[in-house]
Amino acid sequence: MFIIDIIKRSGRSLKNAKARTLLTALAIAVGTFALTLTLAASNGAQHFVSKIISDNFDPAELIVVKDETVLGRTNTTTPQEYDESFGTVASRAGAATQIKRLSDDDLNKIKNLPYVESTRIGLTVSLQYITRPGIKKYVGTAQAFSPAQNPELLAGSIPKPLGNNKLLLPEGYLKALGFSSAEDAIGKSIKVVVKKSFDQSSIASLLQSGISGGSVQLPNPTNTGSLVEQYTVAGVMKKPTSTQPGTELYIFIGSDDAQRLNDFTTKNTSDYHRYPFVYARIKNGKDATTLKKAQSKLSTLGYSSQSVADTEKFLTQIISILQGIVAAFGAIAVIASVFGIVNTMYISVLQRTREIGLMKALGMRKRDIGRLFRFEAAWIGFLGGIIGSLLAFISGTLLNPWITKKLALGDGNSLLIFKPLQIVILIIILIIIATFAGLLPARKAAKLDPIEALRTE
């Protein structure tokens, strides 16, 4: 008997038991529905994170540090020995820690390495305030603009390179600074003020002297001095959706401008020309192998590094765990439905015992009898996969706009992204699982004695 004839006959047999077939297929559809949505959510999360990375980082760059604490790889289970040369005491999650920072010598050393194309310092400067004539003062944070960044602008343009006291203003500042629109802000001047810091380590020494009984006069923070500069708005950035969390209101300025402001605020302190990390662009760094070799070489020089791929992996780790939990529940539902298929096929064998005996009496081989019931199980897996994935696709497509709006993912982003190839592979896997579930009933049908089967009432 030809395979195509067996497939057609198995389909006709299932039609004769529509209710039983549909109920069994729906059991598989539940797991398929969960798995399809999980895959779509995984695609959406990966796409969103990839967009954040591509809009903010250069894949050929490495974040180079002198202390792995900056990269979150420190051991927090044992106390850290104090070293006064570290200067600033940082805090992670409320726990005090110190970090080794890069000096100008370190920067020059990294920059002159043969496999390093260029370096840049990712400076972030806390502004005392920004304002305009007749407008209230607002706190702000300025960051050196990276050539790899690709913010969406409401108005204006991004000078190449950004500098000469020009800045990119976030949309959130428009109303606060008295601009009627993004276009109104272009070319207008904004006053940027930074305050000189005082050395915290010196203060600690003075306090220690006071405890020892000496006379102490603490510096007055209000007398540390301020630097006032005028910046011109070159562009207004649209409220970002694919950006690093917490940087939505960052004002971007040129690297030289950021260096000048940072030098002013840290002059005569232990933070002067000391940097937690530096970006090093590797020659041919878009090649993963080349990047790994550069990381290995930097490690031998006493530096730690992290690539964009490492950052992306870190960002998606928690998402992957949550999606794995949901996928596990979907897989459990599929496994549970396997027993439903076994039960359905066994009932089918018992109800069609005389039919099986007649087919054997007419010359149908055991192998073909087994195939007939295996194909019936495969049909049930196929129907369950189609129903579950179709329901997931329809519901996901209808809910995507609402979910996107609620999560503020922005235009061009979706939480659920369906990939046809993934759905096809999932259905094929379900067909294979269902076929294996039908092996025992098919074996029982193939081994039936035709004479005994024909005697069955």
Image (spheres, rainbow, N blue to C red):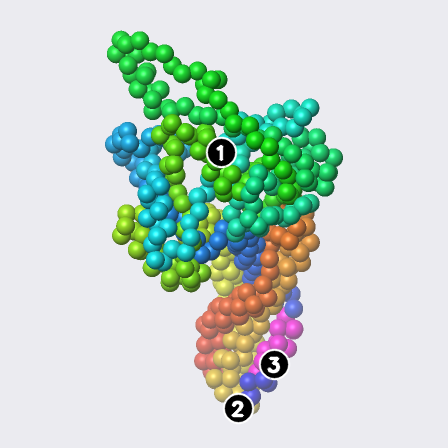
* Three-letter amino acid code of the residue under disc 2: Gly
* Residue at disc 2, secondary structure: loop
Query: For mark 2, does the 10 Å Cα neighbourhood hold few (<14), some (14 to 19), or many (20 or more) residues?
Result: few
Whole-angstrom CA distance, mark 3 to mark 2, is 16 Å
Disc with the residue nearer the chain's start (3 vs 1): 3
Along the line of sight, which residue is nearer the eye, 89 or 445?
89
**Disc 2 target residue:** 363
* Residue at disc 3, secondary structure: helix
* Three-letter amino acid code of the residue under disc 3: Arg
Along the line of sight, which residue is nearer the eye, 244 or 447?
244
What is the quadrant of the N terminus in the image? Answer: bottom right
Q: Residue furthest bottom?
A: 363
Instruction: Give how far across and how far down residue 276 sits, in percent.
Output: 38, 39
Whole-angstrom CA distance, mark 3 to mark 1, is 80 Å
Report the residue at 62% width, 76% height from top: 11
Query: Is residue 323 among what the camera can see?
Result: no
Please give left or right for residue 269 compared with residue 136 in the image. Answer: left
Q: Find the magenta span and give its range.
A: 6-17
* Three-letter amino acid code of the residue under disc 1: Leu
Residue 209 is one of the magenta-drawn residues? no
**Disc 1 target residue:** 261
In front: label 3 or label 2: 3
Instruction: Give how far across and how far down residue 376 sits, in percent.
Output: 56, 74
Please give left or right for residue 210 compared with residue 191 in the image. Answer: left
Report the residue at 69% width, 24% height from top: 134
Along the line of sight, which residue is nearer the eye, 245 or 264?
264
In front: label 2 or label 1: 1
Q: Is residue 87 above or below residue 154?
A: above
